[in-house]
């Protein structure tokens, strides 16, 4: 029902053209889709994860493509997911002693150039402001791809003595990395994230901070987003530009590809030396501080969507769900008691702290069921005329298949709150258990070279080997199979040999193809 | 104790130079201040509001100047104010049916050009991205100065039928308007704000929305920030570029200058026509939607700081205070029972929902009193050895002068929560009452032309006159006195003449010089 407008609105043409240029990025059919309403059907998840993913993001109205190349719009339902991520992470940051602050979006080129590895890593991805109002700038300003630079400069001003340390600051912000491909949450030019930046007097304290925040991320991923992850150390080639050591959490997607879900960096004194963050220590010596940084972006939402969704659409873990339950009253002609009963029950649940909604739109119940299925609301609450008479409601859990005997249960209205609470907890645990089982079943401890290469090439999942740790070996594996190290951990088997190349092993590593 | 660094850190030189170029902006001494620690004293507020303001913002560590021209850093204590603003406003937006979303930072030039008045109004203030990675862009991208354009384009995609309306969306975001001067919160190139954008099927509904959100702002300003305001309609010359009607709330600062604290715009069909937001109405006709936009920025924090502060520093209204109370234990040598008692009491208050902190740093109590005075924490709670023995604490209210008989009260520890709650409410009300009294005493209903010009020139406050509403008259008043209309309301006196020019009056207007 586009009426007077062409099928592809004009402002999108530049974007579509840009996508076409960008080469082999994804196999989905986004070129023909500009509106969520144009997504008629969600293709089967197993057949084409990429097409399924895009269709779900659009049809559930999490995101829209925008006329700005590489940029998506986070629609209210998607923003609801982001708000829940923020709520949980922000509380965890504050519990661990961090405060929020806000630093400038723009970074003068001369400052960006001070940390050599950092600038080399990020320069190709930077968008530059060269004109302000009518004025050509003498020095271009970078839009932050990350904020180590500007924050380092400020910390140098704020820190004088060891008494000023540690500084424990987090920033919720938009960042921008030049990028032609667009895939909601997973690959966009501009994205939302948080970035923590801390400064410490001692190396050990900075390392502890790095690991503490890695664990905050792991906790969030597993206990809130219900996405099991492997935590470990990034290889040298995958390290953050300028870091001494980078840690990550890595999830496994249904197509056997890994998705890096958050990183935490021990920056040592590299940034302190580049940006002059020094302090007078208790021993009257002037020393450079030790800094860390750590970030999680809306990419985590992409991991969550792919991990839990099914052929009907999203399945959102209750702790992340903008709506925990939706009422669908079943109205027989002239009898709207079901609507009134739904509203009363919803009001009581809201008072008890639940996030619920009554869908009283003028549409058939079946149409509404399908819509809330796509949106992945954990529980649907049906109230019909007979339920009104018996004082009950039917709870339908989204995580179970249609026809599953445990999909539906009838519940007395006066027990609704406690039964719903228990059901939500069960859904949260069940989604995690399914994802954990998938990860376990697709993690392979491999000792044989041929098997390793075959599995890596076949995108079998997380392939766990004893590894030499040499960049040359990693390069070779990548060239032959497309897989890279996701992260590593200490070797548990002295004298082991690298499964990939036969040299002495130094670590255990997960290899996988990745997003 | 700057040690090896020069008094003015190098990265700041560009910034300082830019400020010097920028010409006569403010009389403060920022060129010599780069660190909050360098602010030795806060100058008297009455003598030089501008110098007082800058010193307080820096010394209370609300904000820091950054090496990026026109940009400040919102430090954790300042961000705490912003978080409280967000918490209150966000709840009010949600109560009135709005949802949050996030739209792209960058806007292609061709889209910006579609609404003629809008682009004319904003073009001189836009920062342009012309390079991405290694690539020169064929079309420059504007960093959003506001988001009507990109949101209009998206709404055009989302809206098809009257069933899709209204759209009620808010965005929390950073925006950028090219600006050489820098004054924390009041005048910065990049700033944080929220911008609401709604689309409606009917003109009347859009107007109601515009007024509803204006009232949300008034409520927030008065009941949370304790800043009394006048709400009204902007004159044509002060209207938002592209709007049919702009409404504002206006506060009065201690120097007699008005500060526009929020605006709400009825955009009519102007943006809908420029960006093609149309829908199929129930009568099967295709119609353009009616849109609104409304915003409040961190400028509101500037209004709050100037309104309430005194010669000792900030006085923060309790509802906005990052810390409602701070414990200062008074430790006699070897006796740290006061610290333990403070921690216990603080833990109990936290459990009861208070935002409190124990200052157990190794410093003299007097030094701490001065520091928390600067930071404007509403209540200081002193616990000394004698208080420990008698099971009491001394509550000291920040809003009263030293020596005021009601400044201090001794309170039994077991009544601390209820006494503190009552005291915070009293401080909130008292700060508002003081500000309201100031506004009342500096609002002048004037009927005489000479008196009007004299008062406008002298920056006497809000000058309330019957006004013709003609731009020529406004121009003349501005040229002669520096004052402009702040906002207007319906004329209550038929047949009245304009106090400024003698033509027939059409409205009542507040005139004032302004920030």
Image: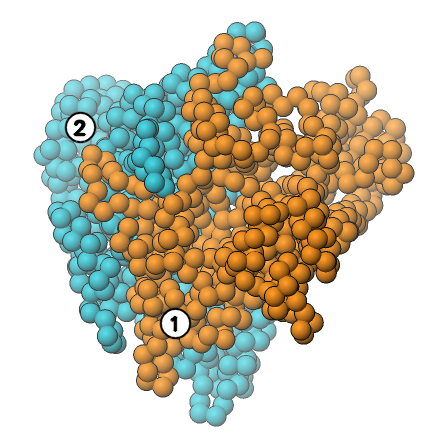
Chain colours: A orange, B cyan
Element type at marker 1? loop
Q: Is residue A339 rendered to the left or right of residue B194?
A: right
* Spot occupied by residue B8 in the image (x, y as percentages of width and height): 20, 65
Q: Is residue B263 rendered to the left or right of residue A77?
A: left
* Tag 1 and tag 2, C-beta contact below 8 Å: no
Q: Residue at x 26, y 30 (%)?
A: B123
Q: Which residue is mark 1?
A: A289
Q: Residue at x 50, y 86 (%)?
A: B336
Q: Chain of mark 2?
A: B
* Spot occupied by residue A251 in the image (x, y as percentages of width and height): 64, 51
The answer to whether B1 is drawn above or below residue A54 in the figure is: below
Q: Chain of mark 1?
A: A
Quadrant of residue B107 in the image? top left
* Spot occupied by residue B96 in the image (x, y as percentages of width and height): 53, 35
Quadrant of residue B492 in the image? top left
Marks 1/2: CA–CA distance: 57 Å
The quarter of the rendered structure image containing the C terminus of chain A is top right
Quadrant of residue A308 in the image? top right
Q: Residue at x 67, y 61 (%)?
A: A499
* Spot occupied by residue A48 in the image (x, y as percentages of width and height): 68, 32
Q: Nearer the viewer, residue A511 or A14?
A: A511
Q: Which residue is mark 2?
A: B474
């Amino acid at each position: 029902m586009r009426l007077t407008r062409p099928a592809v609105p004009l402002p999108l043409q530049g974007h579509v053209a840009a996508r076409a240029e960008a080469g082999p990025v994804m196999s989905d059919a986004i070129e023909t889709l500009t509106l969520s309403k144009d997504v008629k059907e969600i293709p089967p998840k197993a057949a084409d994860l990429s097409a399924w993913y895009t269709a779900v993001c659009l049809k559930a109205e999490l995101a829209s493509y925008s006329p700005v190349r590489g940029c998506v719009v986070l629609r209210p339902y998607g923003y609801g997911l982001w708000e829940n991520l923020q709520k949980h992470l922000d509380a965890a940051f504050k519990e661990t002693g961090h405060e929020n602050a806000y630093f400038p979006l723009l970074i003068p080129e001369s400052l960006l150039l001070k940390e050599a590895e950092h600038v080399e890593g990020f320069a190709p991805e930077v968008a530059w402001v060269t004109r302000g109002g009518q004025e050509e700038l003498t020095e271009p300003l970078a839009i932050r791809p990350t904020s180590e630079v500007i924050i380092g400069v400020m910390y140098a001003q704020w820190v004088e003595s060891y008494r000023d340390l540690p500084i424990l600051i987090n920033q919720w912000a938009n960042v921008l990395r030049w990028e032609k491909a667009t895939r909601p949450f997973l690959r966009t030019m501009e994205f939302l994230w948080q970035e923590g930046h801390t400064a410490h007097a001692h190396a050990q304290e900075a390392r502890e901070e790095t690991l503490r925040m890695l664990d905050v991320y792991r906790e969030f991923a597993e206990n809130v987003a219900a996405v099991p992850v492997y935590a470990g150390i990034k290889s040298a080639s995958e390290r953050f530009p300028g870091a001494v050591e980078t840690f990550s959490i890595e999830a496994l997607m249904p197509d056997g590809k890994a998705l890096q879900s958050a990183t935490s960096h021990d920056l040592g004194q590299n940034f302190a030396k580049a940006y002059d963050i020094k302090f007078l220590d208790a021993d009257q010596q002037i020393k450079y501080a030790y800094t860390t940084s750590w970030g999680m972006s809306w990419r985590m939402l992409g991991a969550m969507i792919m991990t839990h969704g099914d052929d009907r659409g999203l399945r959102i873990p209750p702790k992340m769900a903008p709506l925990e339950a939706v009422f669908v009253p079943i109205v027989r002609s002239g009898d709207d008691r079901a609507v009134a009963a739904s509203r009363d029950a919803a009001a009581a649940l809201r008072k008890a702290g639940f996030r619920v909604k009554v869908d009283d739109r003028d549409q058939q119940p079946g149409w509404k069921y399908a819509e809330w299925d796509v949106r992945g609301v954990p529980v649907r609450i049906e109230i019909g005329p007979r339920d009104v008479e018996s004082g009950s409601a039917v709870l339908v859990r989204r995580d179970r298949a249609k026809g599953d005997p445990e999909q539906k249960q009838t519940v007395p209205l006066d027990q609704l709150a406690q039964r719903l609470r228990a059901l939500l907890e069960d859904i949260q645990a069940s989604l995690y258990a399914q994802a954990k089982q998938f990860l376990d079943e697709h993690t392979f401890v491999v000792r044989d070279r041929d098997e390793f290469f075959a599995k890596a090439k076949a995108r079998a999942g997380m392939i766990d080997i004893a590894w030499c740790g040499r960049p040359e070996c990693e390069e070779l594996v990548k060239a032959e199979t497309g897989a890279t190290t996701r992260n590593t951990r200490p070797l548990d088997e002295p004298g082991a040999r690298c499964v990939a190349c036969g040299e002495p092993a130094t670590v255990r590593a997960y290899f996988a193809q990745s997003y």
